[in-house]
Amino acid sequence: MLDAAHAFLATLNPAQKSKAMLPFNSEERFHWFYTPVSRKGIPLKELDASQQQTALALLRAGLSEKGYTKAETIRKLEEVLRELENSSIRDPDLYFFTFFGQPSASAAWGWRYEGHHCSQNWTIVDGRLIGSSPQFFGANPTEVREGPMKGTRVLSAEEDLGRSLVKSLSAAQRAEAILSASAPADIVTSNQRKAAIQDDKGIAYSKLTQDQQGTLLALIEEYLGARPQAEARRRLDKIRKAGFDEIKFAWMGGLEKGEGHYYRVQGSTFLIEYDNTQNEANHIHCVWRDFHGDWGEDLLGEHYRNSPHHQQASGR
């Protein structure tokens, strides 16, 4: 990522660089949106073809191949929406790259890639990735039903694995897992800076059969798999250390395709939320949050406490 960031920034002229770069301690680092709003940073729209290619090489470095494919397919869905809605705000080039601090192997820096239905965040300290969330993907339409992209379901696994799990539950298990016959209109935590821990409701991993546990683990790994293998492993190790048994799976809404539905997977350290209720249940929002480590805040705090430079600055 560091090499790719340097390569991209080297293509920018001074005016472009001033738009793309903000201080690491900027409050903007914690602002994130998944709706089509005005954003800080440099959009693909203001880059030439060569610069765009270098920018997307950085995105590819920050995501796994699976994650990069999801991000690029979501971006292409803006063309579908532009045709469906005849709206100029739907633009696949209104995706922004924003840097916080100077990319360096010996300092703290971060970057964000964001546009409609995609918000990806990275925090790096002394050459080590310490945070890669919030991680948001959305899809509208969930399933493209006409045109050149007909049949595309970019977030199919997130939908299908969740439904497969809830439909595999026995009546007694469903009594614990299904919280409501109606689903909320969106993910409950929205774009809050700090994800709130949700009610400790749902069915625990320990109360699932071995096959059901496998499905839940596959669902968790689908979210993990958007990141490169080393980062996915780091997240999974953190979950494993906290323990699987009390991870809860909760469902709201209908069980059949085309019915509005919502699920969440909550452990002591993380939260997955998924909602598909808008546009006749053909519009997905899904997110991975780390309760203490979004934007690397837990490890960043530890870094500042233990760094000789910061200890001197604070009088320690």
Image: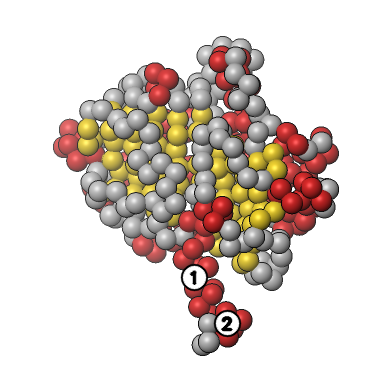
Q: Which dot marks residue 287?
A: none
Image spot of residue 250 (x, y percent): 28, 40
Direction from residue 190 to residue 245 in the image, left or right: left
Residue that extends furthest to the bottom in the rendered view of this protein: 316
Pick whichever of labels 1 and 2 is earlier in the sequence: 1
Residue under circle 1?
A: 301
Looking at the picture, which amino acid does disc 1 mark? Answer: Gly
Label 2 neighbour load within 10 Å: few <14, some 14-19, many 20+? few
User: Marks 2 and 1: in contact by CB < 8 Å?
Assistant: no
Residue 164 sits above or below residue 105 on the image: above
Comparing labels 1 and 2, the label whose residue is closer to the camera: 2
Find disc 2 in the rendering and name its residue. Answer: 313
Which amino acid type corresponds to the residue marked 2 in the rendered image?
Answer: Ala
Picture residue at 28% right of the left edge, 54% below the top: 246
User: 231 and 21: which one is in front?
Assistant: 21
Observer-nearest of 85 and 251: 85
Mark 1 lies on a secondary structure that is helix
In this view, the residue in front, 285 or 204, is 285
Residue at x 42% of width, y 31% of height? 159
Q: Residue at x 44, y 44 (%)?
A: 191
| Place of residue 137 in the rendered image (x, y in percent of width and height, measured from the top left) | 51, 38
Label 1 – label 2 distance at C-alpha = 15 Å
Category of crowding for the residue at label 1, using alpha-carbon neighbours closer than 10 angstroms: few (below 14), some (14–19), many (at least 20):
few
Q: Is residue 34 left or right of residue 241?
A: right
Drawn side of residue 103 relative to residue 13, left or right:
left
- Is residue 75 visible in this depiction of the protein? yes
Is 260 placed above or below 186 here? above
